[in-house]
Amino acid sequence: MDFKDAYKWVNIEFMLEGFLVTLEVAAAAIALSFLVGCVAGTIRYMKIPVFSPIAAFLVELVRNLPLLLIIFFTMFALPEVGIKFGVVQSAIIALTVFESAMISEIVRSGLNSIPKGQVEAGRSAGLTPFQTLWHIVLPQGLRRMVPPLVSQFISLLKDTSLAVIIALPELMHNANIVIGHNFQTAIPALMLVAVLYFVVNYTLSLVSRRLENRMA
Amino acid sequence: MLDFSILTDNFGTYLTGFGKTAYASVLALAGSFLLGTLLAVFRITPVKPLQWIGTAYVEFIRNIPLLLVVYLFFLGLPSIGVVLSPFACGTLGLTVYTAAFIAEAVRAGILSVPKGQMEAARSSGLSYGATMRLVILPQAVKIVIPPLNNQFINLIKNSSILSVISGFDLMFYADRIASNTYVVFSTYIFAGMFYLLLTLPLSYATGWLERRLARNY
Amino acid sequence: MRKRNWLAIGLAMLALTVLTLAGCGKKEENNTGVASSSPSQSSSASPSGASAGGTPTLDAIKSRGKLVVGVKFDTRLFGLKDPSSGNVEGFDIDIAKGLAKELLGDESKLELKEVTSKTRIPMLDNGDIDLIIATMTITEERKQQVDFSDVYFKAGQSLLVKKGSPIQSVADIKKGTKVIGVKGSTSVKNIAEKAPDATVLEFDNYQDAFTALKAGQGDVLTTDNAILYGMASQDSNYEVVGGTFTDEPYGIAAKKGNADLVAFVNGYLKKLHDSGEYDKLYEKWIGATPIQ
């Protein structure tokens, strides 16, 4: 184990650069998958003919496939049918597709947890289904969704490391390059990767717990 | 659009990978169930040091990527002289990683059994271990099964990580077929179908179990 | 109070979304602005342009003011990213610099993007890159997918082993020997023919493959000799053995139909040979004079 070589400033800087890419790609995918997941989850919750079954089919399909396959598919298979993305876009799109399916399930069960009586009350008070959703169900449901949503975001951040297979210059990729230069840096370099992920994710989970407590 | 000759020409290859994926998943499930249950018991025992170990393990592993855990086995161990096969590294990595999630599911299951039962069993003379084994765990199992099933689905999906370290799983062979045939789209579609063959039944079973359990309350 | 709370969460979520989207949009502009402009221009213009003898691809690159080349970041002597300097260096890189200088008058008007054996053709197709200069062997199958320049480097497949290994040539690869290769490379296919009994482990790039060899995951690593010499020069515990057992002529690849770009590359390569500059480059990186 060569701690001295692994923790040379140039190597640390290089890995931090990679972590920045990890965070950027994860942030973009979190924002996009939150939007898509909310829409898909709400569509399934509202049981709209045609749309809800389609959403259900897509969500079930994606939820049961490995993310690695979706990344490969986006990067290498879609070009065959004329749909082409670069490395960064492929990573963001694949992560978004995969995590949206997960988030839509969180949103759906969050909405479902609101007693049906409230929906009926809203409807009989003259609100449209959409108004009922927007003013009554969503505000309450969203609060219950916060803890599972945050843990899904943590998953997403971790999953970004899989983009190493399409040579996205993220943290794991850069750590591999450092290890490639000197194999004895393997454990120290991987330890640094672990610490970086842990610090960010653990902070997120603490924030989630605090939110949960405040809202309870 | 789909080139079925890819499936028929490479059926044996797909099947080999499919078998390895299933094998790795089952091994890792068994391992992570044992380790996860142990960790869950650690976390709720009255013994402080065990609690610390359990909590530290779960919190640490849950917050780092699976790939990192696998690399620790695949690259970390050899750098201190221990070389395991890629398949072993992948399966061990999956086990260590999934155990943290199973520990949480099992702990939630155990905590859902009313405290009074523990007290009642203890005051009727059963030891802590016997109470756990005979009273608490059997009840917890019922509650734990749906989330456990979910973890198994995740495990199957996550086992594709073996392809990154040349673990000869389904994804690895899909890569090989794609680079031999230059037909990428169909190759991965069929690979996806093989994964669905494993995950979809489990997924439906989870839904069914959840509905059934909900009825029981 | 309840109402305000909910509003605050909503606003925070919205702010996060907008911020990250903005960040993402900006990034895409920086990184792949090239990608969005070049494929549309080259794909729409090149078929007619090629027949008319114009230079649509070259014009597009000139008006952009930057040549974008896909190179390896993990291959010593050809394209290696050095974490301590941040630079990418190697034979392929020098060729790319020369092309940028020839075309745009300045070798700094070059953008290098990392490719792997697996990602390079999709990236070329996407328009992410104008050219592949990444230890790419010219093969019949690949000719269906890309247009190749003339041969710019003659390599041959060979073997890398730890010093003192019983494996000294392809003939020593027996059943149960673990051979390490790179996904999507020709060497993996060749070794499956030359040594059908071997177990072939495949990794995503050369860096990971060599790391796996060092980790003791395989007995021998196989790829082109030129790349193996780079690995051996990095770690003196390893040596190249057994000579070459295939011919691997490297070519520079352009997207299919970009005839003007290929012609330009060929012109540059000829100039490089005629001026003797090529031999100097070869010596600088490989440490010998090229085999004629």
Image: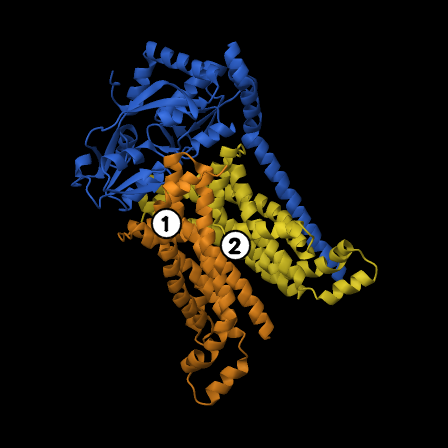
Residue A15: x %, y % from top left: 44, 42
Q: Residues within 10 Å of mark 2 (few under 14, many from 20)?
A: many
- Report the side of C187 relative to A147 (left or right): left
Reading the image, the residue beneath label 2 is: A201
**Residue at (36% x, 57% y) in the render:** B23
Reading the image, the residue beneath label 1 is: B15
| Disc 1: host chain | B
Instruction: Identify the colour of chain C in the image.
Output: blue
Residue B50: x %, y % from top left: 42, 71
Instruction: In the picture, one chain is orange; tell me its letter.
Output: B
- Report the side of A53 relative to B204 (left or right): right
- The image quarter containing residue A109 is bottom right
Number of the front mark, 1 or 2 = 1
Residue A168: x %, y % from top left: 47, 39
- The amino acid type, in three-letter code, at marker 1 is Leu
Q: Which mark is residue C230?
A: none
The quadrant of the picture occupied by the C terminus of chain A is bottom right
Residue B37: x %, y % from top left: 43, 69
Q: Secondary structure at mark 1?
A: helix
Q: From what the image shows, is residue A202 above or below residue C248?
A: below
| Disc 2: host chain | A
Instruction: In the picture, one chain is yellow; tell me its letter.
Output: A
- The image quarter containing residue B31 is bottom left
Name the one closer to the observer, C67 or A204. C67
- The amino acid type, in three-letter code, at marker 2 is Asn
Is residue B202 shown to the viewer in this render? yes
**Residue at (50% x, 85% y) in the render:** B119
